[in-house]
Each structure stands twice: as C-alpha cells, then as structure tokens.
Amino acid sequence: MKAEYANPFIRSAKLIFEKEIKINLTRKDLVKKEKPAPTLPVSIVIGVTGPVKGQVVYSMDDNFAYSVAKAMMPNKLPNEIRKMINSAVSEVANMITGRASIEMAGENDMIDITPPAVFTGPGIRMDFLNIPTISLSFLSEIGILEINVALTEGKRG
Amino acid sequence: MYKGMIVDDAAIMRMRLREILDPQFDIISEAGDGEQALKNYEKANPDFVTLDITMPKMNGIDTLKTLIEKYPDAKVVIVSAVGQKKLVFEALATGAKDFIVKPFDPERVRQSINRLFE
C-alpha cells in the first residue's frame, strides 16, 4: 500500500477529534500488516470504492468508545449515552473517512464510502480484504485509537 | 413554524440536528435511510429536509434525485461527512439548496435552514 494513502487519515483523525471530541490525538506507531484486522474490541469497518479502493478499520476499547459518545452528547445521562455508543463511534469513523476522502478525491474524482459497520466483543469473526495495510495508532487522554488503512489503486473516472 | 425532516443513518446525528433546530423549527419526521425518507416525505410533507449522503438502502444523492423529480420545490440541505468537490457540485446541480460538511457548527446549520425561507 502506498504510504501516501495513510496521510489523509492522520490529518483527518486529528482534526475530527479536536473539533468533535475536543481532545488531541498524538501519533504513536505505524505498523505494516497483511490485512486490516483490528487489535482492540470495538471495531468499525468502512468500505471504500473509486479511484482508491479497499477497507478502513477503526478500533478502540470500550472505555474509549464510551468517552467518544459522552463527548458528543455531554448533557445526557450515562444510560442514554450507552445506547448511543455504536452510533457515535460509527459517525466519528464516517467523519474521519469522509474528510480523508475529500483530500484523496481531489478536484475531479469521486470516492464512495459505505455506511460504517460496528463489531463489538471477543470472538467475533470478520473477513478482511487481503490488502497490505498501514496500521496507525494514536494516543489520547481517553485511550488508544487504531486506524487500519488498507487501500489500493482503483478505477478512475 | 416551518416543519422539518431529518435524514441520517446515525441516530446520534439525528438527535443532535433535532436539538439544534427544535427550538425554532418543528421537526415532524426522521428517517435513517433514503427509502424511509421518501416514504416519510410523502406522509409528513415537510417544509425542509436535512439529508445525509452515506446511508444504507438508498444513498442521499439517489434520494435527492427521486425527491426532486417527484417534488421539484422540495427544500433539501445536504449534511454529510463526504464533502468531495464533485459530489457537492452534483448535489447542488440536482437541486439541493446547500451542502454542509460534518463536523458542523450548529449556527451554520440554523443559518442554512433560515435562508431557505427568506
């Protein structure tokens, strides 16, 4: 995978967390993998098609996911926040991918992204595309965010 | 009071948009995908719609095309994370009145809806 595909996600993730969650993300590691399999228990999978295609898989632990939902609905009670966790982390993943897609599409191309799919808990089996992956991890005051970017060149025009 | 419909597959975004618009507008309907949005529009006949693009079943652009074909005067504001230039042009050329990129500033949303009725 071209390393340049990872950069829009780094910029986008930092921006979205700063604006929407009001926390700073700090880049930790960049690891190369054979496929975008996540290492943390809450995962959000988004498909990408167009001039760039593949999968982007976000992953985090339960506390991180709860903190994201809480930041997006600060005036709600804990039980109301818990009901919205999947929706909140999906939407943040959608915003990061959407913002990165603006950069990757440029002036003349269009990149489609699929609605996010959330998977939680141990023992969930998922099939991932065998696309060389750059796995980015970020540190923050609410924990670690992992973004597995598995993108390759697709059809233009 | 003008009546609105919010279309977004993320429940948290529907909730937030409702909170932003509720004091000034009457949010009479919500939908989580394009197919449901078309059904709800027919029943509720809202004065305006906020429409997401990335949704299951029918995406926002196809929903917008169908809606404008059937109701040429429909007032639709796109609220989407996918603000690619080509997509913004396509949405505006199809008949959307505005295109707001997520994450949004609440005031930007209110201004956009207010402008529909000036």
Image (cartoon, rainbow, N blue to C red):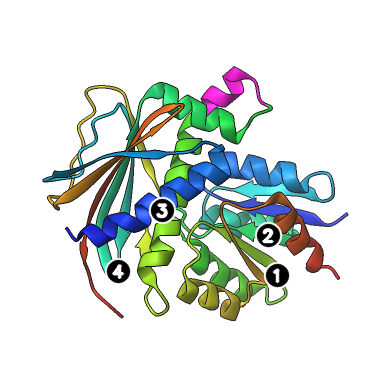
Q: Helix, strand, or loop for circle 4?
A: loop
Residue A90 spot, x, y in % from top left? 44, 41
* Residue type at tag 3: Arg
Which residue carries the number 2 mark?
A: B49
Q: Which chain carries label 1?
A: B
Between disc 3 and disc 1, the foreground one is 3
User: Which stretch did the figure color magenta?
Assistant: A76-84
Q: Helix, strand, or loop for circle 2?
A: strand
Task: Find the distance from the CA under tag 1 to the CA under tag 4.
Answer: 30 Å
Q: Which residue is drawn at 16% across and 58% down?
A: A1
Which residue carries the number 1 mark?
A: B74
Q: Helix, strand, or loop for circle 3?
A: helix
Q: Does the magenta stretch include residue A82?
A: yes
Q: Does the magenta stretch include residue A5?
A: no
Q: Helix, strand, or loop for circle 1?
A: loop
Between B9 and A148, the one nearer to me in the picture: A148
Mark 1 Cα shell of 10 Å, populated few (<14), some (14-19), many (≥20): many
Q: Is residue A4 left or right of B90 when viewed as pictured? A: left
Q: Is residue A72 left or right of A104 when viewed as pictured? A: right
Residue B14 spot, x, y in % from top left? 62, 44
Task: Name the mark on residue A11.
Answer: 3
Q: Is residue A137 left or right of B42 when viewed as pictured? A: left
Asked if the residue at tag 2 contacts the one at tag 3, i.e. Cβ–Cβ closer than 8 Å, the answer is no
Q: Is residue B70 left or right of A90 when viewed as pictured? A: right
Image quarter for residue A135? top left
Q: Mark 4 lies on which chain?
A: A
* Residue type at tag 4: Gly
Asked if the residue at tag 2 contacts the one at tag 4, i.e. Cβ–Cβ closer than 8 Å, the answer is no
